[in-house]
Image (spheres, rainbow, N blue to C red):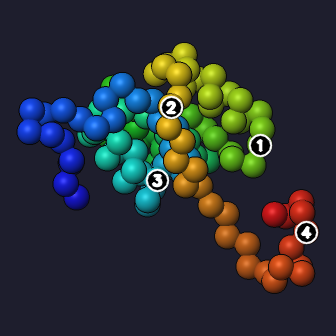
Amino acid sequence: MQSGAGQEGERRLAGKVAIVTGAARGTGAVVARHFAREGARVLLGDVLDERGESVAAEIGAAAHYRRLDVTLEEDWNAAVAEARSELGPPTVLVNNAAVVHLATVEETTPEIF
């Protein structure tokens, strides 16, 4: 993947603060790494604490891990507050976290959705 940096070494996300959900592995981890390479400070959110902490440590000072269950409003409030205090006001959200639910629309209640 190309960095997209300009000829003078400018990074496209310099000064941005991103929250990336589902960032402990897969697409979320790749996005978090790429954003940091492009100059963003990144809060990695996930429920896989050990993996999330490992990815954040690998990225370095530009990253911070926080447990974030995207189904819980209180986790969102805490994550945004922590991003703000540790990294700066969030300017980017990558809502990558997913839960697999195999059922028909008729079988899916609003609570499950």
What kind of residue is marked 1? Leu
Nearest to N terminus: mark 2 or mark 1: 1
Q: Which residue is drawn at 62% across and 31% down?
A: 79
Q: Answer yes or no: is residue 43 visible.
A: no
Residue underneath mark 3 = 28
From the viewer's perspective, tell me whether residue 80 is left or right of residue 34. Answer: right
Q: Tell me if label 3 and label 1 are in contact, CB under 8 Å.
A: no
Determine which residue is flagged by label 2.
91
Amino acid tagged 4? Thr
Q: Mark 1 points at which residue?
A: 72
Labels 2, 3: front one = 2
Instruction: Decide which of tag 2 and tag 3 comes sooner along the chain.
Output: 3
- Find the distance from the CA under tag 2 to the CA under tag 4: 33 Å
The quarter of the image holding the N terminus is bottom left
Which quadrant of the view contains residue 59?
top left
Closest to the camera, between mark 2 and mark 4, is 2
> How far is mark 2 from mark 1, CA to CA?
21 Å
Q: In which quarter of the image is the C terminus?
A: bottom right
Q: Residue tagged by mark 4?
A: 109
How much space separates mark 3 and mark 1, taking CA atoms? 19 Å
Which residue is painted at 40% across and 37% down in the image?
56
Looking at numbered disc 3 in the image, what kind of residue is underneath it? Gly
Q: Can I make out residue 33 in this image?
A: yes
Q: Earlier in the sequence, mark 3 or mark 4?
A: 3
